Image (spheres, rainbow, N blue to C red):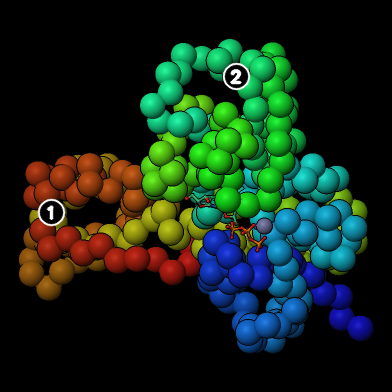
Amino acid sequence: METKLKIAIQKSGRLSESSLKLLKECGIEFDNGLNKLKAEAFNFPLEVFFLRDDDIPQYVEDGVADIGIVGENVMLEKNKSIKLIDKLGFGKCRLSIAIPKDQKYQSLKDFNGKRFATSYPNILGDYLKKNKIKAEIQEISGSVEIAPGIGLADAICDLVSSGSTLFTNGLKEVEVVLKSESVLIANKKLKKEQQEILNKLLFRINAVRKSKNTKYILLNAPNNKLETICKILPGMKSPTIIPLAEKGWSSVHSVVEENQFWEIIEKLKSNGAQGILVVPIEKMIL
Ligand code: PRT
Ligand code: ZN
């Protein structure tokens, strides 16, 4: 029987859509009908398990799944014996300490002898220990933000993204314990065949990721400005130059990184580039 790689992703929640999208962008097709527990890819040796995110590290440790996608927060909290393969760049959030908004705050020392409510007792416990704070931790599994209001805790430690949950509950963020994003984790003892499939998958993931940070750029330039313009454009190797029908002009093609984009466009314009077109890249193999 053909070896397959088993991947566990979140069944329904904040990471589900992006996890599915990532696999799709890698060209992997499968049927993910509602309430399905697992699905087999049609065109790649991959089996997809749909699970609660909290269970994924354990399944990966046990080898029920070979790899999985979870938030770094879950990976660290569960503290299983697994391998971190790569950060995936979605599901970004932070695990923060928050207190009632009209309470004064000076430093972490304020928390000595206080009581925290959190769903992340391990991460918080390590953080407090590292900072030599002695406080009590009350573990609760949901609606952590209401704990101070009902007198269950003095402070909370919970995930924050926009901050609106804290705001509507009259809380303010005072310390960031951890910055988190989705990660790809793997079982520590993958068989050779499984590792090979994982390498293929990682190759595709990297191609997708590279392409997201990069744009394809086309422009027209007078030939006497080509040298300067080529210097502005870094490109993968060097820009492609194609003569235009109009004498003395050329079309220049290259790639630019998203974060340098505006700066480069301005320089190109001031050096005589015209008709600049910028198009998205779907996949990029270096
Ligand atoms: O059912 P299952 O157990 O699988 O899902 P879940 O309810 O445990 O997790 P889910 O879907 O809420 O989150 C999955 C992962 O998404 C988390 O482990 C994080 O890695 C990541 N993530 C990113 C977040 C957030 N952003 C986030 N904002 N997870 C939770 N939140 C919650 C937070 O707990 C708080 O209640 O959103 C609220 C705060 O959001 P803001 O925008 O109001 O600040
Ligand atoms: Zn969960």
Q: In this view, does 87 lie to the left or right of 224?
A: right
Q: Residue at x 75, y 73 (%)?
A: 49
Identified by mark 2, the residue type is Phe
> From this viewpoint, which residue is outermost toward the front?
150
Alpha-carbon span between mark 1 and mark 2: 59 Å
| 220 lies above or below 174 | below
> Residue 188 at what x, y percent from top left?
86, 50
Callout 2 crowding tier (Cα within 10 Å): few <14, some 14–19, many ≥20: some
Quadrant of the drawing holding the N terminus: bottom right
> Residue 95 at what x, y percent from top left?
56, 39
> Residue 141 at what x, y percent from top left?
68, 50
Q: Which residue is drawn at 87% across and 81% down?
A: 2
Q: Is residue 214 left or right of residue 25?
A: left
Name which of mark 1 and mark 2 comes first in the sequence. Answer: 2
Task: Name the element at disc 2.
Answer: helix
Disc 1 target residue? 273
Front position among marks 1 and 2: 2
| 241 lies above or below 35 | above
Give residue 263's quadrant in the image.
top left
Q: Which of 153 and 38 is in front in this view?
A: 153
Callout 1 crowding tier (Cα within 10 Å): few <14, some 14–19, many ≥20: many
| 214 lies above or below 139 | below
